[in-house]
Amino acid sequence: MNRRPERISFRFSARSRFAACLVTTPDGALAAGWWDLDGTRPPYADDTHRFREGAPTETTATQVLPTECGGLLRLRGAAGSGRHLLLLSHPAPAGTVTAETTTAGPPLAGPRGPSWAGTGPEPPAEDAAERLSVEARGLRLVPGGPRGTLALAVETAHDGSTRVWRIRSAPLRLSDPVTLPGRVTALLPLDGTGCRYATDLEGPDGYRPASLDLRDGSRRALPSPPDGRIHRLLLSAPVSGLLLTASDPGDGRLRIARATLGHRPRLDFPDRLNSLDGAVLPLAADPAGERVALRVSRGAQARLFLYDVATDRPRPAELPPGAFHPVAGWSEGGLRVVYAAPDRPADLVGVPDTAAHGALSPLPGAASSTRDASATPHAPTEWFATPSGRFEAVRLGDWRTAPTVVVALHGGPEDHWTLGHDPVLARLSEAGAAVMAPNQRGSTGYGRAHAEAIHGAWGVPDLADIRVLVRTLAEQRPPDAEPPVLLGTSYGGFLALLAVCADPYAWARCAVIAPFLSARGLRERSSPAVRALIDRHGLGEPPDDDLGPRDVERLAHRIRVPLLALHGCDDPVVPVDETRRLRRALTRTDGPEHVPHDCLDIAGAGHHPLQERGGAELTDRLVGFLTAGVPDRHRSPAPPGLTVADAAVRHRPSSAVFGHITHDERTPS
């Protein structure tokens, strides 16, 4: 089955008149998509088809950025090579025949030619008019720049310094670099010239705000709390001089501040803005700098608010709770946000009453009205009580009556499920399964204590929450219902494997994507970035409970359910050797009680094989596996360490099936 088109990596031009993204093709390849939001540029004047799509030659690493002159920049990079290819495309009129035609809309114009700076066979026809090979350790595209500039490129050098380049065309080139002595975060324009920017500049005492002038490279400090430990620039509106920051005024509480620049710079902390219930992120300001779109997140749910700067008054927008991506654009034509719901892939949505004149113009090729979004039912969330507190889960379908219940565990571990769209979970729901996506302890979005509960204890408090969840599901489903099935990715794969080791007869099947087997083993065999994450969390001491050290390789003999593991051979995050070790461990335990297991290495795939070319077929296999009927396991012998009684009551709502954990699992205060 072909997948529904998914759109990712949304970006807006400097004045939000254009937008771009990456969009999946039916076979899982990625192409660049491009909108003229206000329909004022040729070939789109009086043309209702204002969405264009390029050739499917991109990867998830491609950066896309529309320019204010109507072009599209794409930056491709070969992982770890320091080589990049910068491409500039221009839209073609509707009906123009170019190198390659797609089914989603008219293509981008350009000649045929090579599209990759690395090695390997030449991909399909290219759709770029100009190209430039760039050698740089790290490079990212930023909208803006002085007159005659397409955009800015920010390069991070080996010594930690930063260079800001101007991107020019005819010919495509990088010019006029400005060097900064440390790393920078955002570049926010401070005026209409495109020359002055606010940024957070790294120094001996951490990041501090500074203004940068691209004309001469001069810098000046911007106001920040003298006693604060944290400061991050969030959003600017050059016309009104608005500059919003996230600041700790010295009391340990992070709040949003409005910075006033000039001869007497200061920070003000608006009361109503800081009284909103949830995590607040400014998304975009209107062209006059008088109103700001805010995403307010609380747990799995997020709402959109429109904030009046002068009166310090936020009001909810006419959009239902869902997931709002951290990018938005607000032009004279109105506010567009990237909105998603569990059954609605991410797309541009126009927000009513935000256009400068008249009604918001429609968005061909995207969700065009709030009415469409409001009519989309979103999955509710459900809270589950545990001896140590409670946690929230996103719910798709009725888990009490569905023939198959899938418990989906997120990766990270510094992540959480939202009311956004996940293509695999949506496919499972379409196949008739109910999905429970828990935000157990260790998930972000619920406060510091909830997130840090697993520090030094990977697979301990979070595993305890999953064991409570599966017991609750079993107790409230019919006695003859199939046990739930497990799905986990990355850290979620590690947690899923531990769950089927801890309670072998509580589950029907288990599928994992890019799993690892233990924190210690992953630290020894992974990249410096992953090791840094593990070191920040801490390995901790092995728990003193029934399972002992959380090492799936040691516990694999307890697995008694059919298992499917998928792992990209080129995974830069979790080495594919983790799944190969799992395969060997399962093979060593084969005996009379053998259960089927498939551990597949996916050639050419990375950390997210379902999102890459060929991912549609893998998704079909995964969904088919998880929704297949459970084999008869009544006569399977109990695993070592469990009693025969444990195996005999696997369908009975008894805590004996799930064992117990003697380790103290309380959330740290």
Image (cartoon, rainbow, N blue to C red):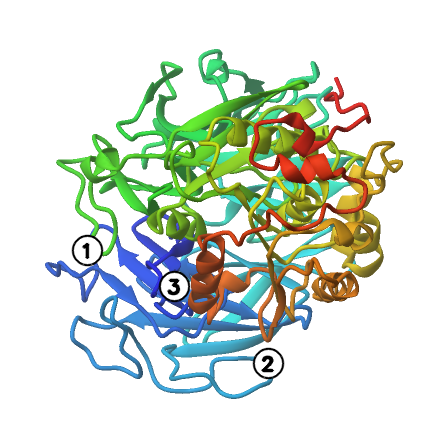
* Residue drawn 50% across the image and 62% down it: 610
Element type where label 1 sits in the image: loop
Element type where label 2 sits in the image: loop
Q: Please, what is the three-letter code of the amino acid marked with disc 3? A: Thr
Label 3, label 2: how many angstroms apart (C-alpha)?
22 Å
Check disc 1 and report the residue beneath it.
40
Q: Position of residue 244 (x, y in %)?
A: 50, 29
Q: Please, what is the three-letter code of the amino acid marked with disc 2? A: Gly
Label 3, label 1: how many angstroms apart (C-alpha)?
27 Å
Which of pointers 3 and 2 lies earlier in the amino acid sequence? 3
Q: Nearer the viewer, residue 573 or 143?
A: 573
Check disc 2 and report the residue beneath it.
118
Q: Residues within 10 Å of mark 1 (few under 14, many from 20)?
A: some
Element type where label 3 sits in the image: strand
Q: Quadrant of residue 538?
A: top right
Q: Please, what is the three-letter code of the amino acid marked with disc 1? A: Thr
